[in-house]
Structure formats: C-alpha cells, structure tokens
Amino acid sequence: MVLAVTAGCAGRPASDGPGTGGATTPPVEPVPRHEPRSRYGNGPVYEVLGHRYEVMRSGNGYRERGVASWYGKKFHGKPTSSREPYDMYAMTAAHKTLPLPSYVRVTNLGNNRSVVVRVNDRGPFVANRIIDLSFAAAEQLDMIRNGTALVEITAVDSNEPAQSVRSEDPPEPQLPDARTFVQVGAFGDAENARRRLTMLRDGGIEPLFLHEDSAVSPALYRVRIGPIADVVQYDSIVEQLQRLGISETHLVSE
C-alpha cells in the first residue's frame, strides 16, 4: 500500500497552497456514484506509526465530528494510497478507515459551509484529526488560514444527490446556532456521572456540566465540556483528558 504520509499533517500553513499560477477555475464537487473498491489502500488491516487500523466494510451510516486538516502542493501529483495521483485542486480527502473510494459530506461547524468530497487516500495519522482535505476542499470550507477546523463528516450514499451548497455567487454563510461540546461519558446512573464530573473538575478541566437526556428511557446523564470555541481549545482539552487517562471522547452539537 502506498500511504500518503501527507495525510498525517496537523494542519498545513497557508504557504502550502498554490501561490501564483494555481488553478483559476472553481473546483467541481464530485457526484457520488457507485465505484468498485480500489485494489490498493483497502487493507483490510494496515499499520502506520505503530497504530493498527481496520478498514470499514462499508461507510453506510458513518457520521463523526472532529478536527479536519488539509494538505497541499508538497504532495501534489504524488500517489495516494489508492495509487491515484493527488490533485490539490480536486475535491478529495484522506481518511483512516473509510473504504476507498467513498463519498462524504464535510461541514465546517464554525461557519456552516459544506462540501462533498471523494475519499481516495489514507490519513491523517496525527492525534485528534479525523480527515485530511485537499487544498480545494479546504478552501471551500474557508479553513486554509487556520489550517484546521471542527467539522462533521457524513457518508453520502451513491444514490443520494450531492445537494451542493455552492453556487456561482454563493452568499456569505450564516453562523450556525448550534454550539459544540466534548462529551466524556454517558451514564445510566446519575451518581456515576457526578463522580466523573468531580474527577474532571479536580483535574482542572472547566467548564463542565451534566446534561440529563430524558428523551431516552431510562434517562442518560452525559458529562460535557464546553462550549468549544476552536481547534486550539479542543486539542488542549483532549490533552488534559489523556493525562487523566481518558481517551474516549465525542464532539456533540446542540
């Protein structure tokens, strides 16, 4: 397997963009269609930097929130894990476990911009990063300058229309009303949830609160941190949690 270690970047500086002489036409979002699995990059199991990854049999129903990064001209034209050449001007992405190829919708939770990309590479192999976007896709999500963004990824079925949010003259997107939190446990027992809350507070993590979800029966008590303003705050919280021995976290919005 050819692995684009590219996809391990934590977030590219804007200088990794095309500079002068780059693409002059707007990128075209891919239209999801059924494709056979690539002969390359589909495992079913592979290892990178001492970590073992199992490729999903199908991306159907996949949805995840986390941090997106992007990669640019340093890897332009080089082979991806699927052996396709990386094109920084195409709407593509790298993911650690989705089948190659796959189609996903990526939404920037900070500005509500959304694009559809075709996953044809592996990565990013950096903690707290769940997808590595091409330069073109990152530009459409307005995340080039920061290098990273909090996003939601949703698998797109090949029979589902792409419903692009782009137009010839797209309006300035409105900030979403939803706020983003780090969830560090869902408990059926309120006392167990309060113990987790106390442990986190004693570890210096704030702001914390307990969310009682009575929409399910029996009720669940969810321990949450936030709201989260940006990737820097998210990374800091994840690092604090890891020092406390907590590695299982989820980004949630409400």
Image (cartoon, rainbow, N blue to C red):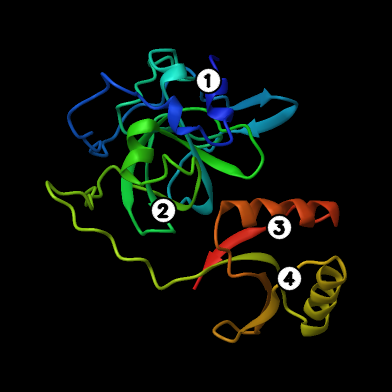
Q: Indicate which label's residue lies in the foreground, 1 or 2.
A: 2
In the picture, the disc for residue 206 is 4
Q: Position of residue 52 (x, y in %)?
A: 70, 30
Q: Can you tell which mark lies on residue 201?
A: none
In which quadrant will I find the N terminus?
A: top right
**Quick check: 204 above or below 61?**
below
Dot 4: within a 10 Å radius of its alpha carbon, few (fewer than 14), some, or many (20 or more) residues?
some
**If you read the primary sequence from the N terminus, does the residue marked by circle 3 or circle 2 appear first?**
2
Whole-number angstrom distance, CA of label 1 to CA of label 2:
24 Å
Q: CA distance from mark 1 to mark 4?
A: 37 Å
Which residue position holds label 3?
Answer: 237
At horizontal 45% and vertical 17% (from top left) the residue drawn is: 75
List the residue tagged with mark 1.
4
Circle 2: element type: strand
Task: Classify mark 4: helix, strand or loop.
Answer: loop
Whole-angstrom CA distance, mark 3 to mark 1, is 28 Å
Left or right of 175: which side holds 151? Answer: right
Residue that appears at 69% across and 79% down = 209
Cα separation, mark 4 vs mark 2, equals 24 Å
Q: Residues within 10 Å of mark 2 (few under 14, many from 20)?
A: many
Q: Earlier in the sequence, mark 3 or mark 1?
A: 1
Q: Is residue 218 left or right of residue 50?
A: left
Residue at left 39%, top 31%? Answer: 134
List the residue tagged with mark 2. Answer: 108
What is the secondary structure assignment of the residue under circle 1? loop
Q: Dots 3 and 2: beta carbons under 8 Å?
A: no
